[in-house]
Image: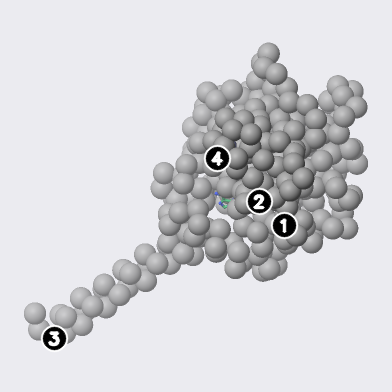
Amino acid sequence: MPPAGWVLAVLALAATVAVALYWLLVSTEGAYLGPRVVTRLYDRYASRYDRVKEYDERYERHFVGEPVARFLAERAEESSQPVWILDVATGTGRFVQAVLQSDGRDTRFVCLDSSRPMLAQARQNLENIAAEGQVVFLQHDAATLPFVDNAFAIVSCLEALEFMPAPLAVIVELVRVTRPAGLLVMTNRVGWQSYLFPGRRYGREQLADLLRKHGCSYVSITPWQVDYDRVLAVKDPAPAAIAQGDWPEMTRCSRCTQAAMVVQEAGLRCSHCGAEMVEVNGIWQLS
Ligand SMILES: C[S@@+](CC[C@H](N)C(=O)[O-])C[C@H]1O[C@@H](n2cnc3c(N)ncnc32)[C@H](O)[C@@H]1O
Ligand SMILES: [Zn+2]
């Protein structure tokens, strides 16, 4: 090959590598490099996240806070117990903020995320909005949720499924831990950028069918942001037992999935495999 040919070949190779790296690290935020890479990238992004996202409070209330408040109001007479809500991939606490700004009821939240700095930012953001003890922060992967079946009245997962290796398995987990007749609040990636996530994107009808197949009804998918639709669904009522009590009683070991976690002096412990969960600086994690 003449020298000019070599130069062109090297330039083409370098451009291909640059495009591939940009897709892997920037466009898809590490989604195809595994959950550890995604988490590390969010660890580094945590302090800038809110500034970059600039969520509009009015839209947050309209699309998230108010539907949740309506759902809670309709079920207010069912129980005088506080309502437990799980927010998976909570990020900096956006979902909890929207709910608390729209509803004054006695709600409690478990905010789960794999990134500790994102949880720390959520904790800071919610400090003056939530009451003492109203929110539990839990560092954990969404793939196996550490809770018993039918634990939460409402389960949410916003702007996160496409970053996980098996989104459908996570959807099945979200439905599993939602109570019968409980509400599921999710997002579905749409727009041209969703095509950058092969194997992780769902068409609207496809997602609605999947949710129905996995035990949900009243599926409603509404355009929300440029990149995301809002998805609401209600878990089908079933004669299954409903978990009662506060959050430690609702936990299940995610290592062996065989037993509930039991409260001990040092934290929570699995009676089957001995896995432990401890609280470090206000954030719970597997030890
Ligand atoms: C785009 S942010 C969305 C945060 C928040 N739900 C919101 O709407 O602002 C994605 C979040 O998902 C979390 N995440 C990504 N993969 C995860 C996983 N496998 N398990 C738990 N959290 C995960 C990241 O740490 C990050 O906080
Ligand atoms: Zn166990």
Q: Spatial distance from mark 2 to mark 3, Cα to Cα?
A: 57 Å
Residue at mark 4: 255
Q: Amino acid at mark 1?
A: Val
Q: Are marks 2 and 1 in contact (CB under 8 Å)?
A: yes
Q: Residue placed at 46% from the left, 64% from the top?
A: 25
Q: Spatial distance from mark 1 to mark 3, Cα to Cα?
A: 60 Å
Left or right side of 211 for 127: right
Residue at mark 2: 285
Query: In the depicted view, which residue is nearer to us: 259 or 215?
Result: 259
Left or right side of 144 for 55: right
Residue at mark 1: 280
Under circle 1, the secondary element is strand
The CB of the residue at mark 3 lies under 8 Å from ligand 1: no
Residue at mark 3: 3
Q: Residue placed at 60% from the left, 40% from the top?
A: 274
Q: Amino acid at mark 3?
A: Pro
